[in-house]
Image: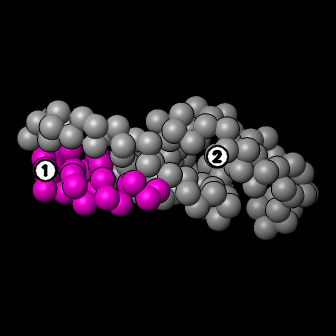
């Protein structure tokens, strides 16, 4: 969902970020291969403690170089929690926050189907 919403911009930013030699994470200065969009999306949608240990440096690079992706991840986490906990009162504040974020198009879709989303939460 993240990658589809942010498309090429996020992937371009991440590729620039992960292709830069980084002395702290790769002592040889070699250029690392950028993970696929699918892999990045999986990392961004699973629980943070379930990211494979060897992929932690990729997540740190994302956190440092592509903050909008982390903002989107946090919003999606909040949305999932709202759905799991059936907290319909959190929907409107979530939409207000998401409208001014990388998930604005998703939030607009939620607004368009507000009644249906409320019913789904309940």
Q: In the rendering, at what x and y percent does residue 26 appear?
A: 82, 58
Q: Is residue 84 rendered magenta in the image?
A: yes
Determine whether, in the image, residue 95 is placed left or right of residue 55. Answer: left
Q: Determine which residue is flagged by label 2.
A: 10
Q: Residue at x 81, y 46 (%)?
A: 32
Near-viewer residue (31 or 115): 115
Q: Residue furthest front?
A: 112
Determine whether, in the image, residue 93 is placed left or right of residue 41. Answer: left
Q: How many marks?
A: 2
Q: Quadrant of the C terminus?
A: top left
Question: Circles 2 and 1: CB distance less than 8 Å?
Answer: no
Q: Which residue lies furthest to the left in this view?
A: 122
Say if residue 9 shows up in the picture: yes
Q: Determine which residue is flagged by label 1.
A: 88
Q: Is residue 74 above or below residue 1?
A: below
Query: What's drawn in magenta, residue-wise?
Result: 79-101
Near-viewer residue (23 or 93): 93
Q: In the rendering, at what x and y percent does residue 8 appear?
A: 67, 38
Determine whether, in the image, residue 11 is placed left or right of residue 79. Answer: right
Q: Is mark 1 on a helix, strand or loop?
A: helix
Q: Residue at x 84, y 56 (%)?
A: 20
Q: Is mark 2 on a helix, strand or loop?
A: helix
| Image quadrant where residue 121 sits | top left
Say if residue 39 shows up in the picture: no
Q: Which residue is drawn at 44% across and 48% down?
A: 104
Q: How far apart are marks 2 and 1 (CA)?
A: 30 Å
- Who comes first in sequence, dot 2 or dot 1? 2
Q: Is residue 57 above or below residue 8?
A: below
């Amino acid at each position: 969902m993240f990658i589809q919403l942010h498309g090429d911009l996020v992937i371009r930013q991440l590729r620039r970020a992960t292709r830069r030699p980084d002395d702290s994470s790769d002592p040889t200065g070699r250029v690392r291969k950028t993970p696929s969009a699918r892999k990045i999306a999986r990392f961004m949608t699973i629980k943070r403690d379930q990211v494979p240990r060897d992929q932690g440096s990729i997540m740190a690079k994302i956190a440092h170089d592509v903050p909008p992706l982390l903002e989107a991840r946090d919003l999606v986490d909040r949305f999932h929690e709202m759905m799991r906990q059936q907290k319909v009162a959190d929907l409107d504040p979530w939409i207000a926050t998401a409208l001014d974020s990388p998930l604005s198009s998703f939030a607009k879709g939620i607004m368009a189907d507000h009644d249906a989303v409320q019913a789904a939460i309940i």
